[in-house]
Amino acid sequence: MNFENTLEFAQSLDANDQFHSFRDQFYLPQYAGQNAIYLCGNSLGLQPKSTETMIAGQLASWRNLGVEGWFDGEEPWLPYHRKLVGPLAKIVGAKGSEITVMNSLTVNLHLLMVSFYKPNVKRFKILMEGGAFPSDQYAVESQVKFHGFDPADAVIEIFPREGEYTLRTEDIIAQINADADELALVLFGGINYYTGQFFDLKAIAEAGHTAGAIVGFDLAHAAGNVPLQLHEWGADFACWCSYKYMNSGPGGISGIFVHEKHHNDATLNRFAGWWGYKLDERFKMTPGFQPERGAEGWQVSTSPILLMASLHASLQIFEQAGSVSALNKKSIQLTGYLEYLINQVNEFIGYEQFKIITPSNKHKRGSQLSLICKSGGKAIFDYLVSQGVIGDWREPDVIRLSPVPLYNSFEDVYHAARHLLAAVKTVVKT
Ligand SMILES: *Cc1c(COP(=O)(O)O)cnc(C)c1O
């Protein structure tokens, strides 16, 4: 599409956007009495207006039913998580039995590694993307140590080539092949939080399996952002948080995926808890853990119903939208428009003040663009915030901007770029 750098053009895109009215289902943060231009859904998604009612419904059950709320009321708590499974299975491309919701993301990464990182003297290495989200790095290092290995030997990080910012799939596959005999686990982010690169998860899963390794994905920045086919790709396990693109609120409940092929494997280690016990016999409280079939067998603790209600509100909006693929069509345009406008800003200034390090290929990114600021990055970022443009800042020089198709408009993107230009004019000394 040929974009134009005018407000009228942005508004005409909004007028033709089938998802434009979805914005009204969210609270937009306020800045100086106006809607902020919120481009930070990669960090914390906005609050659906329905969240409060949804949580209030469960507070009412608790108020009116007490403990009987587990079994009674319109939405008994015992099977409540299953209301979330259907929509989530669609979002990540899985079967319902492969999905459940529990805990938070890093906790789930640990629990899944307990089952799926089974090092031995020959195969003990974990391959991951260099510069993975720190929590994932800490989780991996501590798992490796827990098994008596040294992270310096056991953790292989793959970095972009000299002078490049993102990884080439061929290099990832070559690294997997090079370490094939020693790899226990390939653990990759779906989308790298810093660069916004969407990895070729299908190719990574294939290569990992050919090497004889287990393949797991952290989908924190991918779930609800880009179309996924976890089942078909054959990923062994995955987990994600729901407070980024899935709008479940700060610290919202995490989701996990365990591929069907592992559901009958009794040899897998688990850190078990009663909430993973077979549902129909759970309350017999007998000794000897017997897991529920499927991903639910990985549950540990009592369902946090208020967190689940919050996610439920957001998932209903995803259901209305139809599919992540449909949203992704808008996302590609919206992010493409932002990319075009940033390049316009560079042209106008006469040098590349903002270097977009996120891949320009629309299949290799989601909604986020990461910009390296040539100079004055933090001052530019602070200026944006002072004008009500909310992105986020990553040291030493990166601004991340993520227009989200559920609640951002083309007009948002237009104004964000306008403020970016004003920021350079105002705070950068050239
Ligand atoms: C956001 C994010 C996390 C955060 O984990 P929590 O346990 O929810 O705090 C972890 N890993 C990645 C890749 C993330 O993007």
Image: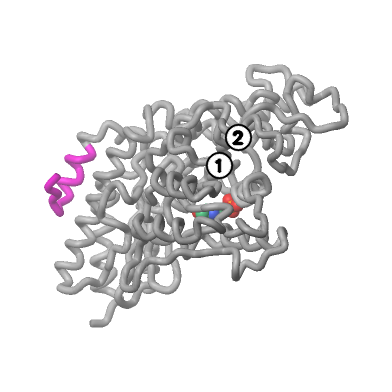
The circle on residue 363 is none
Looking at the image, what colour scheme do you see? Answer: one colour
Circle 2 packing at 10 Å, graded few (<14), some (14-19), many (20+), is some
Which residue is label 2 attached to? 262
For the point 52% across and 47% down, which residue is it?
215
Image check: 381 left or right of 217?
left
Compared to 124, does 61 lie above or below?
Answer: above
**Cβ at disc 2 under 8 Å from ligand 1:** no
Specify which label sits upstream in the sequence, 1 or 2.
1
Quadrant, the N terminus: top left
Residue sitting at the far bottom: 430
Q: Give yes or no for residue 9 being in the magenta stretch.
A: yes
For the point 66% across and 60% down, which residue is it?
144
Circle 1 packing at 10 Å, graded few (<14), some (14-19), many (20+), is many
Q: Which residues are magenta?
A: 1-14
Where is residue 331 shown, x and y percent of the image? 31, 43
Residue type pointed to by label 1: Phe
Quick check: can you spot residue 390?
A: no
Between residue 267 and residue 238, name the one nearer to us: 267
Between residue 44 and residue 361, name the one nearer to us: 361
Q: Are marks 1 and 2 in contact (CB under 8 Å)?
A: yes
Which residue is label 1 attached to? 237
Quadrant, the C terminus: bottom left
